Every structure is written in structure tokens, then in C-alpha cells.
Amino acid sequence: MEATIVTLPGDGIGTEVVSEGVKALQATADKYGHSFTFDEGLIGGCAIDATGAALPDGTLQACQRADAVLLGAVGGPRWSDPAAKIRPEQGLLGLRQELGLYANLRPVRLYEPLLDVSPLRPERLRGLDLVVVRELTGGIYFGPRREATSNGGTAYDTMVYTGDEVRRIAHIAFRLAQQRRGKVTSVDKANVLAVSRLWRRVVTEVAAEYPDVTLENMLVDTAAMHLLRQPTDFDVILTANMFGDILTDEASMLAGSMGMLPSAWLGENHAGVYEPIHGSAPDIAGKDIANPIATILSVAMLLRYSLDLEHEARAIEDAVEAVLAEGYRTLDIRVDGATPVGGEEMGDLIAEAIRERGSPEPAHVSEVSTRAHVHQEKKSHA
Ligand code: IPM
Ligand code: MG
């Protein structure tokens, strides 16, 4: 197939990890006979420097035309003045909002070779495989706000959800659970927040349409604790924008490192944005030590959800697992006896494994149709 992929490397380690993601895409194209055209754009701090805006019009338009977008990370000390009116993060928030990408899928899967890397005991982690479905274009990130004009002044942010916003993200979580282990844990703060009480009522209503899925409601503080106590209890976690932001950073440590967690931003159209959940890590930028795996696994999600190439997505995930099993490790996932590699070498090893391993024939036909289903069903619940 032919596809146009916009790359937005952004700032800090964003540029390094996106290069390795592109390598994985090229290896996939060569191996499976696809043709991907890459179009690079500016976002975040580098975009502010070049154009004065964190999300330049040209970038937004290129993303609107693309089949998918691969994003690195934004931000850095250079643009972090709290008094600044234009901030790199506005690039991410603007892109989510402008493209209507309200569903953020953040899978947290423990790759068996990394069992000893997480700070948690291995027996609590074996078999860990959960997905956080985070609402991405509403809630406290986008509600009415006021900046304080002085330290004696008042500032506020408001958490707002409409029933429709809750309903559409809930459907995504339930559809996903149907293809997985059939459980949704909806995380809220319904004992305190009115917006969470609406959330809980609407999610419970949607659950009635999915008799094959079990719904569990959990308060966010309990969820934070339970993620460490018994993380394998979770299958699909459905939650609001800010709770999802916080819980996914916590959950990333179960997988060994933030450097392992990919994500997808999805909306009504097939095109989505894919990015590692980690940030721009300016302290390690330019040293070739950043782990590119989160970005390479994001590329697998891109193939799965935007290009419907499930077999190729699996091939990338298998290549990652194989390289880890051979003992190659970047700094963040190193253990005794591992073979230390830099980010670029890790990217090369994975690209090589994609080219050499796997069969060119789709081997998981039933998976192809069920995974693609997430997207189709999502459309019908717009
Ligand atoms: C994330 C990030 C962003 C968020 C920031 C950089 C705006 O933390 O994608 O998790 O809070 O959504
Ligand atoms: Mg975050």
C-alpha cells in the first residue's frame, strides 16, 4: 500500500526517537512491499523558534492531509518560562483538538525479557497487559480557565464533560474490551466531583449495551494504589484526560520504563497521531542514550490503527521482543549481563530484525479483522 506519513520530531530526544521510528517504517515497507512517503513538519519549541507558533498552520494542514502522523516530543528549558504566552505543549493540545483526536490508547504491556527491570516484584508483573483509554480533548485540560495576574490573585481550571463526550470514549473502551479480556475499569472521582458522577452514570448506561463486558468503577486514588498492588487485575482502564495522564506515567514503570510506552490518538477518521508517552528529556538529548522502543511500538500502532496492517504491526512488536530477548538494552532498561547499546543501535537492531524475521504472509487473519473493528465501530458511535 501507499501512505503519506507526517513526522513531527519536535524537541529534545523527539528527533532521535522519530529517526528510529522511521527506520522501522522503512524496514517494514521494504519487507512487505509498501511505499511510505514521509513529510516532516515543525511542532513545539522548534516551531516557536521558527514561526512564533507551537502548531504552525502548515503543520496542521499537512497532518489533516496525511494518512497518519508520527510525533516525537515537545518542550525544553528554553521555552519553559511560566510567564510565556506561547508554550510548546500548546502544539500537542492544539493538534489533538484541531484533529478531533479524543481517544488516547496507551497500552501497558510487560515484555517478558524486562521482568527484572521494573521496580515492582516480578511475580506481580508476569502477564501484565492492560490498555488505558484516556479521553483526550475534554476535561480539565480544555475547560474554562483563568490565569492569575498576580500572586495575590485567583487562578482556576475547570473540569467539564458533556454526556456525549463521555459516551463516545466509553464505547471505544467497551469495544476494545470485547476483543481483549472483557473487563473495563472506569476510573473517576465520583465521591467528590459532579463531573465524575455524570461520567459514572453515562459509562454505566453504555455498559448495558455490552453484556459480554464487565464494568468496574474505581476511584482514581484507589486506582493509583491498585496499579501497584495488583496490576494484572486490569484489562481496559477508561478515564478522563488528566487522570489518564497521571496514571499512565505511573503504569509505565510497570513495563520497566517510560521508554517502552507507545500511544495512539484516534478520532473519527482513520488518520491518527502516534507518539511515545515520554517527553523530550532535554537532559539526555543529543547523547544517543534515549530508548527508541516507545516510538517504534507507536509505529506498530500506526500500522495497526491507521493503515490496517495488523500483520506488519505484529512483526514490529515481535522484532522488539526478539531484540530484548537477545539482551540488548538501552540505559533505562539495563540489567546486569545485558549488552548495552545506544538508541541508534537499538533502532538498527530492531529494523534488522523486522527485515529478517517473520513471514511475508499475514498469519493472524482473524486478528486483522477484529482490530480494524475498533476503528469502524468507533465511527458509528460518533
Ligand atoms: C502526555 C503529556 C502531555 C499531556 C503534555 C506534554 C501536554 O504529558 O501526552 O502525557 O499532559 O497530555
Ligand atoms: Mg503525560
Image: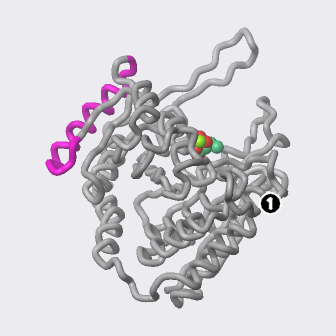
The front one of 14 and 378 is 14
Hey, what amino acid is under mark 1?
A: Asp
In the image shown, does 137 or 206 lie closer to the viewer? 206
Q: Residue at 53% of width from left, 85% of height from top?
A: 2
Q: How is the image coloured?
A: one colour
Q: Position of residue 347 (x, y in %)?
A: 68, 70
**Magenta span contains residue 195:** yes
Considering depth in this image, is 149 or 166 the residue closer to the camera?
166
**Quadrant in the picture for residue 328:** bottom right
279 lies left or right of 248:
right
Residue 75 visible in the snapshot = yes
Q: Which residue is mark 1?
A: 288
Q: Is residue 133 above or below residue 225?
A: below
* Image side of residue 193 versus residue 7, left or right: left
Q: Residue at x 27, y 53 (%)?
A: 181
Which segment did they paint magenta? 192-214
Instruction: Where is residue 221? Give x, y as percent.
Output: 44, 25
Residue 197 in magenta stretch: yes
Q: Quadrant of the C terminus?
A: bottom left
